[in-house]
Image (cartoon, rainbow, N blue to C red):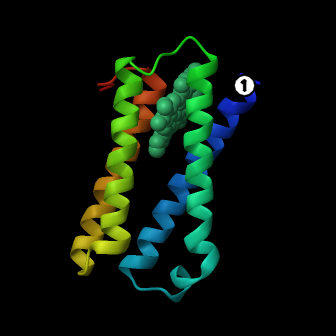
Amino acid sequence: MVMSLLMLHKAAVLVSIIGFFARGIGHIFQHNWITKKPVKIVPHIVDTLLIVSAVAVVAMTGFSFSDPWIVAKILGLIAYIGLGLMAFRFAKTRGAKALYWLLALVVLFYLVAVAVHKQAWPF
Ligand code: HEM
C-alpha cells in the first residue's frame, strides 16, 4: 500500500513538473492551447493527488510532519503554488511571468533534491 502511494506521489510529481514546464512556455509565448479547459483542470487534479499521496505516505510510515525535510517540503510546496499563481494568474508582463515561472522551477528542483536526500538543505 505504501509503495503504491509512493509511486502515485512520484508519478504525480513527474506529471506536475512536466505540465508546469509546458504551461509556463504556453503562457509566456501566449499559445492558444493554454486556454483549453483540460489544461486548466488537469493540473488541479494532479496536484491534489500529489498532496494527498504525500500526506498518506507520511501518515503511514515512520516519517513525521515535524521532520525538518518534511517541513521544508510543505513550505516549498506552498512557495511553488504561490509562484505558480503569480506566473499564471497575476503577472501581467511576459518578463514577470517568466521570472515567477523560473523561480517556481528552482523551487521544484529544490523539492526533488530534498526528497532524494531527505535533508532540508540537500546541497
Ligand atoms: C511539489 C512538491 C513535491 C515534490 C516535487 C516532491 C518530490 C518527491 C520525490 C521526487 C520523491 C521521491 C524521492 C525518492 O524516491 O528518492 C518524494 C518522496 C516523498 N515525498 Fe514528496 N514531493 C513534494 C511534496 C511533498 C509533500 C508536501 C510531502 C509531505 C507532506 C512529501 C512527502 C514525501 C515523502 C514522505 C516521500 C517518501 C520518501 C521515501 O520514503 O523515500 N512530498 N517526493
Is the residue indicated by label 1 positioned so its CB lies within 8 Å of ligand 1?
no
Name the spot of residue 80 as percent of width and height, x first.
37, 50
Write the residue at 27% across / 79% down.
94
In the figure, residue 66 lies in which quadrant?
Answer: top left
Where does residue 65 sit, x and y in percent of width and height?
Answer: 44, 22
With respect to residue 14, does 24 lie above or below?
below
50 versus 20 height, above or below? above
Residue at which label 1 appears:
3
* Residue 106 percent location from the top left of the image: 32, 48
- Point out the image quarter for the N terminus: top right
User: Which residue is pictured at 33% across the width and 63% down the height?
Assistant: 101
Type of the residue with mark 1: Met
Query: In the rendered image of this protein, does residue 57 appear above or below residue 63?
Result: below
Q: Is residue 13 left or right of residue 79?
A: right
Q: Is residue 22 left or right of residue 100?
A: right
In the image, residue 31 sits, relative to residue 65, either above or below, namely below
